[in-house]
Image (cartoon, rainbow, N blue to C red):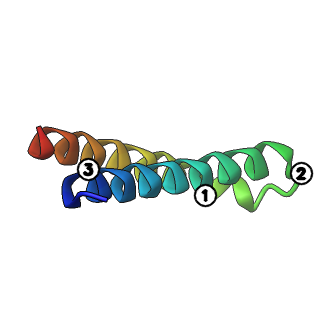
Amino acid sequence: MERNLLSVYLINRQIFLNASRIFASAIEILVSTNFDIVSLIPLLILASLFFYRSKKELSTSLS
Protein backbone atom coordinates (compact mmCIF):
# COMPACT_ATOMS: atom_id res chain seq x y z
CA MET A 1 0.00 0.00 0.00
CA GLU A 2 1.30 3.43 -0.84
CA ARG A 3 2.40 5.64 2.00
CA ASN A 4 -0.04 8.47 1.13
CA LEU A 5 -3.00 6.11 1.04
CA LEU A 6 -1.97 4.51 4.31
CA SER A 7 -1.71 7.84 6.13
CA VAL A 8 -5.12 8.96 4.80
CA TYR A 9 -6.61 5.63 5.89
CA LEU A 10 -5.14 5.92 9.39
CA ILE A 11 -6.32 9.52 9.76
CA ASN A 12 -9.86 8.65 8.65
CA ARG A 13 -9.87 5.68 11.02
CA GLN A 14 -8.84 7.91 13.93
CA ILE A 15 -11.52 10.46 13.03
CA PHE A 16 -14.14 7.71 12.98
CA LEU A 17 -13.01 6.33 16.35
CA ASN A 18 -13.04 9.76 18.00
CA ALA A 19 -16.46 10.58 16.57
CA SER A 20 -17.75 7.25 17.88
CA ARG A 21 -16.44 8.00 21.36
CA ILE A 22 -18.03 11.45 21.38
CA PHE A 23 -21.34 10.02 20.15
CA ALA A 24 -21.28 7.27 22.80
CA SER A 25 -20.64 9.86 25.50
CA ALA A 26 -23.57 11.94 24.27
CA ILE A 27 -25.86 8.89 24.32
CA GLU A 28 -24.70 8.03 27.85
CA ILE A 29 -25.53 11.55 29.02
CA LEU A 30 -28.97 11.44 27.43
CA VAL A 31 -29.79 8.02 28.85
CA SER A 32 -28.45 8.68 32.33
CA THR A 33 -30.84 9.86 35.02
CA ASN A 34 -28.10 11.02 37.37
CA PHE A 35 -27.81 14.82 37.51
CA ASP A 36 -24.07 14.68 38.26
CA ILE A 37 -23.42 13.76 34.66
CA VAL A 38 -25.18 16.92 33.45
CA SER A 39 -22.13 18.87 34.61
CA LEU A 40 -20.08 17.00 31.98
CA ILE A 41 -22.11 18.38 29.07
CA PRO A 42 -20.00 21.56 28.67
CA LEU A 43 -16.83 19.44 28.64
CA LEU A 44 -18.33 17.19 25.98
CA ILE A 45 -19.26 20.21 23.85
CA LEU A 46 -15.77 21.68 24.19
CA ALA A 47 -14.18 18.35 23.28
CA SER A 48 -16.40 18.09 20.22
CA LEU A 49 -15.50 21.61 19.09
CA PHE A 50 -11.79 20.98 19.63
CA PHE A 51 -11.97 17.72 17.70
CA TYR A 52 -13.86 19.39 14.83
CA ARG A 53 -11.32 22.21 14.64
CA SER A 54 -8.34 19.84 14.66
CA LYS A 55 -10.00 17.65 12.03
CA LYS A 56 -10.56 20.69 9.83
CA GLU A 57 -6.92 21.82 10.19
CA LEU A 58 -5.70 18.31 9.44
CA SER A 59 -7.77 18.01 6.28
CA THR A 60 -6.54 21.38 4.98
CA SER A 61 -2.92 20.47 5.66
CA LEU A 62 -3.27 17.21 3.71
CA SER A 63 -4.78 18.93 0.69
Q: Nearer the viewer, residue 22 or 40?
A: 22
On the image, the x and y values in percent for residue 5 come to: 28, 51
Whichever of callouts 3 and 2 sits on the residue coming sooner in the sequence is 2
Q: Nearer the viewer, residue 40 or 52?
A: 52
- Seen at 57% across and 51% down, the residue is 22
Q: Position of residue 40 (x, y in %)?
A: 61, 58
Q: Nearer the viewer, residue 63 or 21?
A: 63
Q: Is residue 57 left or right of residue 43?
A: left
Q: Which residue is mark 2?
A: 33
Circle 3 residue: 54
Q: CA distance from mark 3 to mark 2?
A: 32 Å
SS assignment at label 1: helix
Q: Quadrant of the C terminus?
A: top left
Neighbours of disc 2 within 10 Å: few (<14), some (14-19), many (20+):
few
Residue position for label 1: 40
Q: Position of residue 8 (x, y in %)?
A: 29, 50
**Image label count:** 3
Q: The residue under label 2 is which amino acid type? A: Thr
Label 3 residue SS:
helix
Mark 3 surroundings within 10 Å by alpha-carbon count, few (fewer than 14), some (14 through 19), many (20 or more): few
Classify mark 1: residues with Cα within 10 Å, few (<14), some (14-19) or many (20+): few
Q: CA distance from mark 1 to mark 3?
A: 21 Å
Mark 2 or mark 1: whose residue is earlier in sequence: 2
